Image (tube, rainbow, N blue to C red):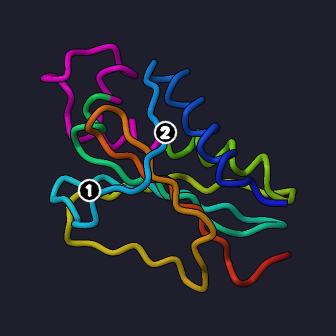
Amino acid sequence: MLPTHDDIVAITQSVMATVLELNPEECASLPGEPRADRVTGCIQISGQWKGAVVLETTTEFATLAAARMLAIDEQKVTDADQQDAIAELTNMVGGNIKSQVPGPSFLSLPSVTTGLDFDIRLYRAVCVDNVPLRFEDLPIRIVMCESLEQGD
C-alpha cells in the first residue's frame, strides 16, 4: 500500500517542523508559471517498489532552510549550502515515504538541480501524487512518482 496524499502532507510537515521549525500548510495549488529561482531535489526508491520523490521549491526557501539547518545568517548562505539543505530535506521526506511503500526498498543519493532551464523526466514513471504546500509566501511541492516496472 502506498502512502496517501494526507500521509505525504503529514510527512512533509513533520520533517519541516522538526528540522526547520517551520509549519508549511497544504494549499490548493501553486503558481503555474515556472520561476527562474527554482530548486529541485529528487531521490529514487528501488527494490520491491520503484519510484521517486521530488521536492520543488525556490532559492528563497532553500536559503531559509540552509540558514536554519546550519545555524547561520541567511546572507552567509552559499549556493552549495542551499543545494545541501534541499538534498537533505529531499532525503528525509523520501526516506519517510520509502518506509510506507512495499519493501524491502532502498534510497538513492539525492540529486539537486537549480535554475529554470531544465526538465526532470523519470523514465517509465507516472505521477501518483502532487502535494502543494506553502510556508508564508514560499512554495514547496512534493511529487511522488511510481515506476511502471514494479518488483525485482
- Residue interval drawn in magenta: 65-89
Residue kind at label 2, given as amino acid type: Leu
Q: Quadrant of the N terminus?
A: bottom right
Image check: 72 left or right of 14? left
Residue at 63 percent of width and 37 percent of height: 10
Residue at 20 percent of width and 16 percent of height: 73
Query: In this orientation, which residue lies closer to the viewer: 39 or 110?
Result: 39
Residue that label 1 marks: 114
Coordinates of residue 145 in the picture (x, y in percent): 60, 69
Give neighbour class at mark 2: few <14, some 14-19, many 20+ (Cα, 10 Å). many
For the residues bearing labels 1 and 2, Cβ distance under 8 angstroms:
no
Q: Is residue 81 magenta?
A: yes
Residue that label 2 marks: 89
| Marks 1/2: CA–CA distance | 15 Å
Tell me which secondary structure the magenta stretch mostly adopts: helix
Seen in the picture, residue 119 relative to 134 is either above or below; the reply is below
Coordinates of residue 46 in the picture (x, y in percent): 72, 65
First-in-chain label (1 vs 2): 2
Query: In this orientation, which residue lies closer to the viewer: 120 or 111?
Result: 120
Seen in the picture, residue 115 relative to 11 is either above or below; the reply is below
Seen in the picture, residue 148 relative to 79 is either above or below; the reply is below
Coordinates of residue 116 in the picture (x, y in percent): 20, 65
Residue at 30 percent of width and 52 percent of height: 39
Residue kind at label 1, given as amino acid type: Thr
Q: Is residue 84 magenta?
A: yes
Residue at 43 percent of width and 23 percent of height: 22
